[in-house]
Image (tube, helix red, strand yellow):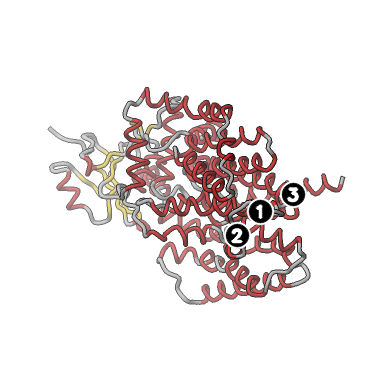
Amino acid sequence: MKQRSLIRTDWLLLAGFCAFFFFFGLPYFGLVGADEPRYAQIASEMLNRYDWITPLLGGKPWLEKPPLYYWQAMLAYSIFGVSDWAARLPSAVDATLLVVATYFFSRKFTPRIALDSALMAASAAATIGFARAASTDMPLAAMFSIAMLAWYFWYDTGSQWFLLAFYFFTGMGALAKGPVAPFLAAVILIIFAVLRRNSKLLWRTLWLPGILLFLVVTLPWYIAVQIRNPEFFRVFILQHNLARFGSNLYHHKEPFWYFVPVTLLGLLPWTVLTLVSIFSFRRISGPREGENRNHVLKCFLLVWLIVPILFFSISQSKLPGYILPAIPAGVLLAALYVQRCTADERRPGLWVAIFHSTVAAAPIVPALMIQYLVLQHRLPWGRGAAISVVLAAILAIGLTLTLRSRLGFAGLRFTLVPVALAVLAVLRLGAPALDATLSARPIANEISAMEKQRLPLAVFQVSREVEFGLAFYRNEIVQRYEAGEIPSSEHLLIAPAASQVAIAKAVPGRRVSYLGSFAPQGLDYYWVGAVTH
């Protein structure tokens, strides 16, 4: 009875933290960047046409990514209607599935701290950030991570059901972002088998029913989309996978070491514990007599963490979301360190406690100053900054004292306090600034308020972020002057401030009237008359 009560408490805590970290405040600010509104609009167009095969943007095939996110968003739109927060629901749900899988995994391998392991996975900065984004990154990370956890369950228990789950979720990862999921899984398992000096492990993994299940999950869509769109293989495989990896075709060039700091930031607030766990690991090869299960698991998690970092570091195109599949491995490494210390009834060392507490509390400062960072792109010193630093220092000292007290690692859950405060500060204090400066939502709202009748919309010399955002919020095809898409009828035009001369040259002989401006993004609104003959 007591065990059931504890499990029920665990589930209530997990539900509460996932609800806050992933779902709370999803509509507080509009879709940002180019990817969020683009993916959201693709799902909307697919739903409008009841087309579950071909991703569409502006009525044309958009074959950059597989359909898993789009399918999830279409389902969310069907239930809740088309909106920016509904577009973010798939990532929030997938992050929750990842946390649940981590909890089940931890109940077997880190039973003393199963709840803590799951809460650590939920509270990692990268998990929270991408769980709130309308993108394909969290669907891939969740499906891939669940697949890796299932494989290790099979490796430890021998149950074929877990091997089936591995193939199923690897297939879902291939539907989330393409061949990167099975490729990374294969590399991780090969390296792990080599380190364990167990070549038979790979042959056992290559199980025919599992392979058939993988093909059943993935092939129907890949075959259907290729038949309907003969250019799919060239666009998706050659251009958006191989060319993206081997060249700077999409202008995401970063230094080789880029993903090291990105990973360390993504693991916050558990970065220090992950590093301590890694550096306390003296031997990764095996097997050896008397070796415990935690050592083998640590070897697996270390390979899982390092392989995506190295693989994407070699890539010529780098974006922060690429590293997300490695984050659960880093968090579980930290959990293994905590489990070992808890089993030995050891408190964290003084310097470990200090560094962990400082790193955990530090994000409070930029979170409370988020408006200045967004609007001024700097952290100005003043009363607000001083208050933020003092609050972070108090939290760091309090957490350090807690970890060094009799509670020891049992007080680790207090780390969630600065995390929750930082999330709350960003959502409550930073949302208006984020919405005004990074989203097209307020622009679309102003346009709708000023127009007396619905007119076509065009853009001139504005960013892709604005173009895709307007397309989603107005649910229409936005014409771009630079691409020669100048409507012959009267229309509204969005352009950078003081662009009257350039606009006049683009539409000679047509009436152009200034309607207003949106100062936070430096944009003006114009009415352009129809072509006269």
Provide the residue designation for mark 1. 288
Provide the residue designation for mark 2. 283
Q: CA distance from mark 3 to mark 1?
A: 36 Å
Disc 2 or disc 1, which is closer to the eye? 1
Task: Pick the quarter of the image with the C terminus.
Answer: top left
Looking at the picture, tell me which residue is in the foreground, 423 or 407: 407
Tags 2 and 3 touching, CB below 8 Å: no
Residue 276 in the image: above or below residue 191: below
Amino acid on which the number 2 mark rests in the picture = Arg
The structure residue drawn at horizontal position 45% and vertical position 27%, both measured from the top left corner, is 221
The structure residue drawn at horizontal position 69% and vertical position 51%, both measured from the top left corner, is 293
Residue 16, image x and y in percent? 68, 49
Q: Secondary structure at mark 1?
A: loop
Task: Pick the quarter of the image with the N terminus.
Answer: top right
Tell me if mark 1 has few (under 14), some (14-19) or many (20+) residues whose alpha carbon lies within 10 angstroms of its own: few
Residue 509, image x and y in percent? 13, 42
Which mark is on residue 10?
3
Amino acid on which the number 1 mark rests in the picture = Arg
Q: CA distance from mark 2 to mark 1?
A: 10 Å
Work out whether mark 2 precedes mark 3 in sequence or the reverse, and give the earlier one: 3
